[in-house]
């Protein structure tokens, strides 16, 4: 029997870092939401007791470094499962992009194996297990739109934001999340107002959402990689309503309300950047059911 799960990408509409903690992680407060760009995960029972990763993408590790592998391994150990699993990853989300592709694959694997192995775990239980793999996994288990706090694992659900187009543009560099956090000087950056973003979402206020986007990690990545700044500038020039880097980057996203404007921004960016996507903001939890 085979199980299919969707693993959608996330963007950070707002990302604030409050302070560096004693465990080396940073205390964050961020508003995250899913977009309609997703990997597809196929899970199949496998004879023997091993986990095998299949992927056609050369940047995706096929061993225990893969976050989907780690998700299966955690469940197997914790619940003494003695059967194997084949995990096939149809990679659509760019790798090392700031879009939580690997975290979402891990989350989809947890959701799928929970069903396949009949574990009966709740979303909260799966998210707690997922947060051992990475800070973004808890959000990805739940999906939708949420405020994430702690190191990213404390999730408070929000309603869906106003619907719009999201243009994603990823320059051909990979960014190390650890490097970006390491280079952040919390007291020297401009902090976004998370409460204003949350209020805009509750009010279904598109302009408010655009006006309160902000990411403290952006200035760090921009100073390390000038090409990210160039893409931001181009996206604004072609007419996106608001433009921001997602997570630790390097992907830049632009929100666009109107279809006609979306084509102009998309076509304009294609001239500068190989990896450009025009997708819808999802933000609805049912998308990962
Ligand atoms: C940038 C974001 O993607 C925004 O959603 C997340 O904060 C990072 O999530 P992630 O990639 O799942 O991060 P993890 O795999 O847990 O951590 C990678 C590295 O980032 C740093 N890190 C991550 C999360 C956090 N709250 N504080 C940190 O300092 C740590 O050095 C850690 O070793
Ligand atoms: N299933 C996976 N898909 C993609 N990359 C993976 C996966 N598992 C492990 N990795 C490794 O993780 C690294 C980061 O990939 P990923 O696409 O998750 O980054 P990201 O989008 O920047 O994540 P985040 O936004 O959570 O920081 C890659 O360089 C890759 O080696």
Image (spheres, rainbow, N blue to C red):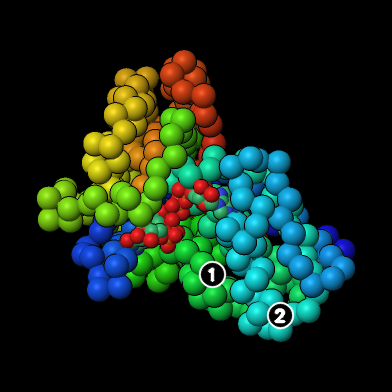
State yes or no: discs 1 and 2 in contact (Cβ < 8 Å).
no
Residue 282 is at least partly visible in this image? no
Q: Position of residue 242 (x, y in %)?
A: 33, 35
Q: Secondary structure at mark 2?
A: loop
The reply, left or right, for residue 271 in relation to residue 80 is left
Q: Which residue is mark 1?
A: 130
- Classify 10 Å Cα crowding around label 1: few (below 14), some (14-19), many (20 and above): many
The residue lying toward the viewer, choosing from 80 and 258, is: 80
Gap in angstroms between the C-alphas marked 1 and 2: 15 Å
Q: Position of residue 111 (x, y in %)?
A: 65, 67
Q: Secondary structure at mark 1?
A: helix
Residue beneath the point at 71% across and 80% down: 119
Q: Position of residue 104 (x, y in %)?
A: 56, 56
Image quadrant where one finds the C terminus: bottom right
Which residue extends farthest left? 188
Residue 18 is at least partly visible in this image? yes
Q: Position of residue 249 (x, y in %)?
A: 38, 42
Q: Mark 2 CB in 8 Å range of ligand 2?
A: no
Residue beneath the point at 51% across and 63% down: 137
Q: Which mark is residue 119?
A: 2
Residue 56 appears in which quarter of the rendering? top right
Q: Earlier in the sequence, mark 1 or mark 2?
A: 2
């Amino acid at each position: 029997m085979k199980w299919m799960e969707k693993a959608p990408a996330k963007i950070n509409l707002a990302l604030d870092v409050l302070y560096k903690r004693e465990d080396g992680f940073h205390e964050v407060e961020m508003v995250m939401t899913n977009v309609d760009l997703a990997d597809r995960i196929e899970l199949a029972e496998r004879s023997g007791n091993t986990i095998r990763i299949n992927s056609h993408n050369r940047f995706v590790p096929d061993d225990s470094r893969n976050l989907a592998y780690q998700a299966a391994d955690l469940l197997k150990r914790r619940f003494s499962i003695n059967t194997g699993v084949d995990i096939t990853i149809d990679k659509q989300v760019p790798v090392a992009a700031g879009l939580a592709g690997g975290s979402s694959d891990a989350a989809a694997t947890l959701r799928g194996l929970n069903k396949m192995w009949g574990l009966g775990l709740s979303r909260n239980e799966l998210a707690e297990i997922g947060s051992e793999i990475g800070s973004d996994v808890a959000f990805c288990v739940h999906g939708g739109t949420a405020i994430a706090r702690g190191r990213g694992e404390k999730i408070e659900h929000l309603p869906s934001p106003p619907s719009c187009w999201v243009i994603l543009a990823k320059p051909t560099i990979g960014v190390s999340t650890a490097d970006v956090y390491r280079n952040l000087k919390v007291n020297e950056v401009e902090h976004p107002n998370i409460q204003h973003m949350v209020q805009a979402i509750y009010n279904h206020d598109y302009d408010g959402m655009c006006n309160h986007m902000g990411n403290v990690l952006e200035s760090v990545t921009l100073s390390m990689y000038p090409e990210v700044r160039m893409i931001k500038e181009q996206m604004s020039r072609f007419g996106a309503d608001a433009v921001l880097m997602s997570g630790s980057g390097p992907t830049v996203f632009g929100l666009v309300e109107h279809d006609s404007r979306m084509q102009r921004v998309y076509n304009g960016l294609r001239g500068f950047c190989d990896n450009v996507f025009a997708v819808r903001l999802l933000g609805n939890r049912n998308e990962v059911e």
